Image: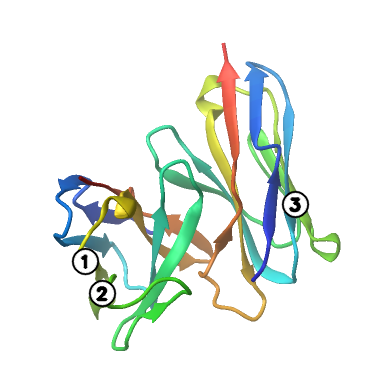
Amino acid sequence: SAVISQKPSRDICQRGTSLTIQCQVDSQVTMMFWYRQQPGQSLTLIATANQGSEATYESGFVIDKFPISRPNLTFSTLTVSNMSPEDSSIYLCSVDEDTQYFGPGTRLTVL
Amino acid sequence: GIQVEQSPPDLILQEGANSTLRCNFSDSVNNLQWFHQNPWGQLINLFYIPSGTKQNGRLSATTVATERYSLLYISSSQTTDSGVYFCAVALTTDSWGKLQFGAGTQVVVTP
């Protein structure tokens, strides 16, 4: 099973700033996924990150707001840009190896 | 997109009780998984079960793909079973890891 770590685990940020979240996997994976969980809600897929190509974004999410990097097969970053209080959520990184594994999440609060 | 409906939304159990959680989905899927999100936010994969029946300790799950539903059974519940249980699916025509989550069932097990 994959072991996934995320940094930071939590952060409090000011409106208008940006935060980059890092995701590290202990094995090489083709695809990595970024999900958002708004307070009291379920998970929503933001984008799929493939190494060597542009990320694929789901409806309602755009690259300018959530730029993603995937420099190698074990690492990805998600940036939350020009933040507003509505961006306060848990952001989770995920990989699939038949079953889906999730990182511990980054708990973001925007003031 | 595919609809994923979970019931009941909330469940309060006395320790030792049994319960059944249900997940209905609106389209053909190639991937169905059950997750437990503990009170600290960590998502744990319980079952990958696009069809058939599986058991793991006190938990078991059954998916009837032709009728588009899945059931999660919790037997002899313990306080550590508290948390939110999510059903998540991926369309047959879509990428494996692009999961659509249901709204979840909030379970509270009381001593």
Looking at the rendered structure, the kind of residue marked 1 is Ser
| Residue at position x 46%, y 66% in the image | A96
Question: Between disc 2 and disc 1, whose residue precedes?
Answer: 2
Relative vertical location of residue B65 with respect to residue B81 in this rendering, above or below? below
Where is residue B64 drawn, in percent x and y? 82, 57
Looking at the rendered structure, the kind of residue marked 3 is Ser
Foreground residue among A37 and B91: A37
Relative vertical location of residue B86 with respect to residue B80 in this rendering, above or below? below
Viewer can see residue B50: yes
The label nearer to you, 2 versus 1, is 1
The label nearer to you, 3 versus 1, is 1
Q: Which residue is mark 1?
A: A81
Foreground residue among B2 and A98: B2
SS class, disc 2: loop
Query: Which mark, residue B70?
Result: 3
- In the rendered structure, the residue with mark 3 lies on which chain? B
Q: Quadrant of residue A29?
A: bottom left
